[in-house]
Amino acid sequence: PASWMTRENVFVFVSVQPPKQHEEELSLSPTAAEGTVLSLPAGSRVLDAIRVTEKWSMTLESSGQLYDGRNDFVALRNGFRTSSLGTEVLASGDVVSIIPSDELISLSKRRSGASTAASS
């Protein structure tokens, strides 16, 4: 019975990282990242996961910005930047991270530093 569920649905992890300036406003915790597991129909794309996430994410709701791949937030799938349209098809176990654009800049700087250190 469980096998039909995995054929009809994909299970993905979604996390939302708030922008830095929101952290002082939120008294919950210093990071206040949000995350959950979504069950989506097979064939769903990154954008479908993002649209579902917008419905429950306090971070995305409070920023008043719906995700469009260009503004304040960018999406990563398994650690790699997705297209601005979020057209990549999801597989079970994928991790979709919605992070502030400025975080991506610092992340890519850290990555490039790590890769040069690894090659030497």
Image: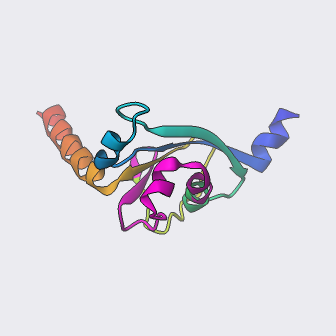
Residue 93, above or below 70: above
Looking at this view, is 80 or 25 the one in front? Answer: 25
Which quarter of the rendered picture does the N terminus lie within? top right
Which quarter of the rendered picture does the C terminus lie within? top left
| Residue drawn at (38%, 50%) of the image | 99
**Which residue is situated farthest in the left direction here?**
120
Is residue 65 located in the magenta-colored stretch of the structure? yes
Q: Quadrant of residue 46?
A: bottom right
| Residue drawn at (43%, 64%) of the image | 83
Residue 59, above or below 86: above
Q: How many marks?
A: 0
**Residue 58 position in % (x across, y down):** 51, 48
**Which residue is situated farthest in the right direction here?**
1
**Residue 85 position in % (x across, y down):** 49, 69
**Residue 104 position in % (x across, y down):** 29, 51
Looking at this view, is 5 or 39 the one in front? Answer: 39
Q: Which residues are magenta?
A: 51-80
**Residue 4 position in % (x across, y down):** 84, 42
Q: Is residue 85 left or right of residue 11?
A: left
Is residue 5 located in the magenta-colored stretch of the structure? no
| Residue drawn at (54%, 60%) of the image | 88
Q: Is residue 90 left or right of residue 97?
A: right
Q: Colour mode?
A: rainbow
